[in-house]
Amino acid sequence: MNFGLPKGSLEEATIALFSKAGYRISKGPRSYRPAWDDPELDGRFVRAQEMSRYVENGFFDCGLTGRDWVKENGSDVVEVADLIYSRASNRISKWVLAVPDSSGIHEVKDLEGKTIATELVNVTRNYLAENEVQAEVEFSWGATEVKVPELVDAIVDLTETGNSLKANKLRIVDVILETNTVLIANKHSWENPTKRAKVESIAMLLQAALEADAKVGLKLNVQREALQEVLSSLPALRKPTLSPLSDESWVAVETVIEKKVAREIIPALKRLGAEGIVEYPLNKLIP
């Protein structure tokens, strides 16, 4: 099966995600053809901006790209799974309409007759049409935020945190599109039972790896007389696995919790008399 992997900013994050999912991908520094440890998989790296066209046309059976580029290209593909990850974080990104802090543009209607720079030309034009605004949209090759106000009146740019916009003294007027990485498939390949089963298996493992990334496993021992207090005091432990120990007055507890709350829960457990507390990382978590 021919699998398209994103070249560029998502490349290293994608290789790391596949590693957590159980697939080893290796490549040379100048190579566009990955080496998989799965003999059923082949493919190459291409820009995310182009991926949906190659999948739609059948060059790839499936591939990873952004939902924004599927919309920008108007590609007729199957969106198999949402995979919320990026180079910097595991969060949804946004294409926003932004202007200088001092600009008189405060809503989309104020763009009438103005010029906008963006990489997402078609989506931006559709956005303007939906709002019945006539404005010029020009393609930007990058560093879009530095083009206002001297070269253009506004920009449509991708942001995760908004820090770059603030650093360039820009403010957000509107959110045009929310986007994240998606696993897409060619429609004919999706109709092939063997290929579809393979794509669905990969999707499940990738989603499981992302789900596990924000959580940790937790083991501890607690006296039976304190067990209910532990369970009632710590909502994250509502459905743990309980196992008897050789000393019947003690119980082993195992559960999964959010990684970000572990630092609060572990001291609380200790204060309630828990012993042998172990926190461990997870590779995959399948509901």
Image: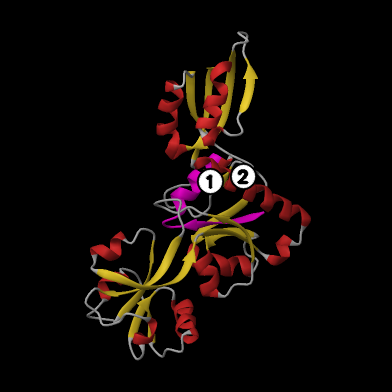
**Residue 190 location (% of width, % of height):** 72, 61
Depth check: give the residue in front, 214 or 46.
214
What residue would you read off at disc 2? 205
**Residue 92 location (% of width, % of height):** 46, 58
- The colour scheme applied to this rendered structure is secondary structure
Q: Quadrant of the C terminus?
A: top right
Give the residues drawn in magenta, as a range: 1-20
* Res. 26 in view: no
Depth check: give the residue in front, 169 or 146.
169
Q: Residue at x 34, y 76 (%)?
A: 155
**Residue 51 location (% of width, % of height):** 54, 64
* Vertical placement of residue 268 versus 139, above or below: above
Q: Residue at x 29, y 70 (%)?
A: 171
Depth check: give the residue in front, 249 or 188.
249
271 horizontally vs 75: left or right: left
Residue sticking out furthest to the right = 193
Depth check: give the residue in front, 11 or 125.
125
Q: Is residue 19 magenta?
A: yes
Q: Quadrant of the N terminus?
A: bottom right
Q: Which mark is residue 30?
A: none
Q: What's under tag 1, amino acid-wise?
A: Leu
Q: Which mark is residue 210?
A: 1
